Amino acid sequence: MIMLEKRPQPSRGWTFATPVVAVLLTMFFGGLLFAALGQDPLVTIRTIFLDPLFSEFAWFYRPQLLIKGAPLVLIAIGLSFGFRAGIWNIGAEGQYIVGAICGAAVGLAFYPIESFIIFPLMIIAGALGGMAWAMIPGILRVRFGTNEILVSLMLVYVAEQLLASMALGALRNPDGMGFPGSRNLSQYDSAANLEIIAGSGMHWGVVTAFIAVILAYIALSRHIFGFNVRLSGQSPRAARFAGVNPGLLILVCMGISGALAGLAGLFEVAGPAGQISIDFNVGYGFTAIIVAFLGRLHPVGILLAGGLMALTYIGGEIAQSNLGLPIAAIQILQGMLLFFLLAVDVLTNYRITFGKGQKA
Amino acid sequence: MDLSAINPILLLASLMVAATPIILAAIGELVVERAGVLNLGVEGMMITGAVCGFVVAVGTNSPWLGFLGAAVGGAVLSLIFGFLTQFLLSNQVATGLALTLFGLGLSALMGQGYIGIKAPSFPDWHIPLLGDIPVIGPIVFQHDPMVYVGLAIVAGVWAFLKYSRAGLVLRAVGENHEAAHALGYHVVRVRMLAIMFGGACAGLGGAYLSLVRVPQWTEGMTAGAGWIALAIVVFASWRPGRLLLGAYLFGGVTVLQLNLQAAGAAIGVEYLSMAPYLATIAVLVIMRAGRAPGSLGQSFHASR
């Protein structure tokens, strides 16, 4: 009879190995899924995971990797602080939307003045907008003890309605002949989030994502704040004795994740997306949850996981146009990845033993 | 805006219909949480139920078989969650989220060929005598059968938890799994059954949306109903009676905002559509939740 025996401490080897095993399992079962959909599994897996990097059109797809990966990494870094401390902000999608709306509103307010100060102001507005949206569940949790999971998620739906209202009303392009959607920010030089090196995909959001990774690494491994976060997650009682203020920690973690999600939204609306439109959000806020877990809530891991997840997005689009693979299959693949990761994770904390079926 | 266009009797009658999917999903999750398991995948199981129910109902032309298929679909999906959290001891919050993400993808894939088709009709019951009572008749006794099935499940769960021995065991497992284990109850078995019941109920709730309330299949059609069901379980302090109250409150807000939209209220449509979500948040803030089951959300590992 197969039994689980708790390890005295988590296995270091498995901590690093589980994401890799999970990816391999996902590729295998994803292949079965594709075969069931009438595709050649090997060709599909190659199209999704290898073609964006190594095919003859890879020069076109590689910059996309940065563009798609940056918001995922940025949001996931923010989420990782809260997740480590047992604070579940799963409404990053809403904070992403509100950050984009606030940043775009500041940019559009200046139109058509050209000034170097506009873009920095937009960045500040985006971060503050996302932060304010995340503060709602944070403050309600601290003040009234409401569940932050449910409140932050409800606010995603509110933010989506707000986005629709903005695209159709307050922020609609006055020269747009009544079509929904704002002015195109990427054609407004002072507000545009342009590529720093043309054709590389390297825009300011990518730079910010890299900076966030470095700062998060320092904060988590070298600063007392990171220690408090980890302590609160592992033993809330011990953290209280150590003098950690749990309410303040909740607000700070929610604030960081909201601000980073807001920044991701702003960089997206000012760059790759270009404008506030009804279908502006594409679920980065939810995929970032997978990225955070796949990266083991560690900044470097998140960077790698963000790259991998961006790869599945791009590969999924290629598979959709070349092989006719439904895009929902990619969503399933991403969900599967999280399942396998959580499943294999049992090996980090437990050892499998083959007992003789003695009664527990 | 013309408020006289809103008929209070119709409003109350449609309130019962609007609340039904939430009641179904919430009562299932209530049982799951009373057994000490927090399954955040309600949204994913609901939407999977919605598509399974729709596919079966269109295929067999029978709404009843559709509901059966939805319950089976939801329960099968919940088995993934059960296996991961009960046998592989994964984090329940993360696994529930994964279930939702996976369910949204799976439903989109399964429902591809079914967009734009109409579900087979599911006629209302006109209950003799009771349905003829003025005012109360049209509000309470002239609905489709699933409305009453939902109420019957709530009553059944209430009686089960309060009066049956099995209900007592389930509550014991939820309050203190170590103690229940020491008494010789099978914690994991009880929890797996509860999780499957929760999945089946969420599936029924989803199918009610795709077969009765809309009645069509569109991607992402549950639009947060599963999350609202989770919120209502907290609001209800894990008690079936208060769950009905919460669901009707929510149904009332939904129906009222739809009526105001139709009546051409001066507020924008988008802001009215926010109302159910904002109301849910307000309810969570105002109503202090009672005590949660003692072992809620904790993994159980029987150490020798």
Image: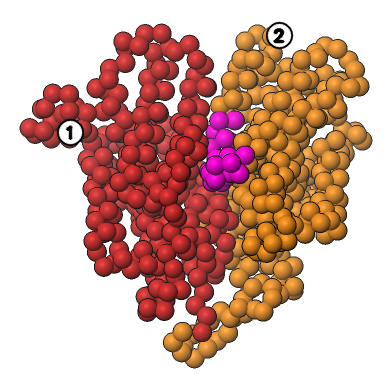
A123 displayed left or right of B90 = right
Q: Residue B187's image quarter?
A: bottom left
> In this picture, is B151 found above or below B83?
above
Query: Would you say residue B206 is visible in this rendering?
Result: no
Q: Residue at x 29, y 59 (%)?
A: B161
What secondary structure is found at the residue carrying circle 1? loop
Q: Is residue B100 visible?
A: yes
> Residue B122: image x %, image y %?
25, 36
Which residue sits at x=46%, y=88%? Answer: A357
The residue at which mark 1 appears reads as: B141
In the image, the segment drawn in magenta is: A139-159
Residues tagged by mark 1 and mark 2 found on one chain of the structure: no
Q: Quadrant of residue B55?
A: top left
Magenta highlight: main SS: helix
Report the amino acid beneath label 2: Asp
Q: What's the colour of chain B in the image?
A: red
Give how far across and how far down residue B44 sits, in percent: 48, 48
Q: Which residue is mark 2?
A: A175
Q: Residues within 10 Å of mark 1 (few under 14, many from 20)?
A: many
Lateral position of residue B60 relative to residue A225, left or right = left
Mark 1 or 2: the one toward you: 1
Could you tell me residue A304's position as x and y percent?
A: 78, 55
